[in-house]
Amino acid sequence: MATTEQFPTELQAHETKDTPAVAIEDVCKSFGTQAVLSGISFAVSRGETLAVLGRSGSGKSVLLRLIIGLQTSDSGAVRIHGEDIAGLSLDQLNVIRKKMGFLFQHAALYDSLTVEQNVAFPLLHHRKEMSDSEQGERVKQLLAEVGMEGHLDKMPSELSGGMQKRVGLARALALEPGILLLDEPTAGLDPISSAEIDDLVLKLQAEHQMASIVVTHDLHSAKTIADRLILLNQGNVTAEGTFQELQSSNDEFVREFLKHS
Amino acid sequence: MSDRKLLAVGGLSPLFSGQPLSLSSPERTASKWVSTEFLEWFGELGFFFWRVVRAGVTPPFEFRELFRQLDEIGSKSLPLVALAGAAIGVVLSLESVQSMTRFGAKSLLPAALVYSVVHEIGPITTALVVSGRVGAGIGAELASMKVTEQIDAIEASAVNPYRLLAATRILACTLMLPLLTLAADACGLVMGWVALASTEPLSFHQFITSGFKGADFNDFLPPTFKTAVFGLIIGLVACFQGMRTRGGAEGVGRAATSSVVLSSLFVILADVVLVKFIIIFFP
């Protein structure tokens, strides 16, 4: 188990090289009578970035929450490195969660902790073998990666939205995840900050070769950072492919969505 | 229960449900509260407590957060609790001088003061003060974390929020209430003596000797340790109300209010049961 936690991108005993990092198989999710996801399926391979597009309320964020296990699907399977997370105990699920990094829409930084303590949080709980100085070095290295090395002692409330996203990204990368989930990474940011976040995600992607799923409304951002896109509509995957393939789609909703984005 | 009483308890409905006040008819609100929301709330509270206990007794233990909460709940409540205890001691002493002199029982004044402060006034005052300060604080803090997805972020980081946030706060409340009660008792007695000594000459030694004459540990330990139950109630209700919050700033405000109201209410109800229990088992 210790080996698995230290080297999360290594293959598990039950998976092969072709096993996708994340596989969503016929997943349904409803809230009361409202069906949000109606049997969607897709897969994301190691090193690939998938952008999930769709209208507000189309279940994009719910999809990420299902993948990290914050919510459970009504039916279907969510497989992480080939393992279905449904029915896992909390301890088993937490082993899987350590292999994933999650950037929340509003960064969700712990507002009573400094930037340094926020990034150190996962290390403090899951890298107990590291000394305080090693953890401190790792935090500095992570903050340097996202261009926030000079803001260690600041509180989240002292940071702009873009800076909070960067710190959130550093925290998501703390445990060297094999899978990165980004919920609206550029939402609410000015065009320059959005472009900086896009560049940062591309740089991190090139360095760490993670499987990434990016939920976004920002078509420009999706075009920049994603290898492949899927478009959700009424709980289903309406279109899937590269940006160019979506552009040449004859589907009315796809054309409408791209026209207004 | 009469209709009027039903309507009165119906007014608590939003506190339990965590939802905004309903504009439906009062009769419907009251009956709905009795039949479903009240039972539902208790069921969820029981399930929440079970999850917290299960998380709290299994490693890894969150000692760092526990010590932080002991400081936050214990040390930082001390001045307020001591002040409340001192004020109650003075008031009780001044009021008792009048009444006991009238009934010719002035010599019993120190004993009456000691018994009333240690048995009931100290514990319940401490619990209500802590409920107001700590209950509101925990409720608002956790509710704010909930609505800003910080609790989700903790869970996504593979850390159990029931262990990190709830178990540590509930345990800190449970451990700190008896200690704070001792402080409130001590301040109440000292200031009670000061108030008494200002009306007639009485040394502190005489006051203590007379006040504690014939008393044994059964007179003091159960009333002090019953406050651990009060601490458990305050911590549990505040954490529960905070972590089940929904709906932005309004939800945070509602969680803070309901934490204080419900924990104070349950502390008073628990006191009734515990006093009877103590009278039976520690006569």
Image: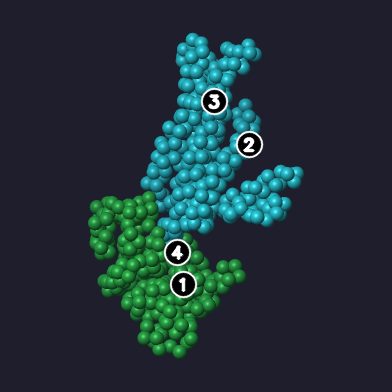
Chain colours: A green, B cyan
Q: For mark 3, does the 10 Å Cα neighbourhood hold few (<14), some (14 to 19), or many (20 or more) residues?
A: many
Q: Residue furthest right?
A: B2
Q: Where is residue B153 drawn, in percent x and y?
A: 41, 59
The chain holding disc 1 is A
Please give the residue where the numbered disc 4 appears in the rendered image.
Answer: A93
| Callout 3 secondary element | helix
Quick one: SS at disc 4?
helix
Please name which of the two marks, 3 or 1, marks the residue nearer to the observer: 1
| Residue displayed at 54% across by 50% down | B254
**How dense is the environment of label 1, judged by Cα within 10 Å: few (below 14), some, or many (20 and up)?**
many
Q: Amino acid at mark 2?
A: Val
Q: In the rendered structure, the residue with mark 4 lies on which chain?
A: A
* Residue annotated with mark 3: B117
The residue mark sitting in front, 2 or 4, is: 2
Q: Are marks 2 and 4 on the same chain?
A: no
| Image depth: mark 3 or mark 2 in front | 3
Q: Secondary structure at mark 2?
A: helix
Question: Which residue lies at the image location 43% right of the left edge and 79% below the top edge?
Answer: A260
Label 3: chain letter: B
Q: Residues within 10 Å of mark 2 (few under 14, many from 20)?
A: few
Question: Residue at label 1?
Answer: A60
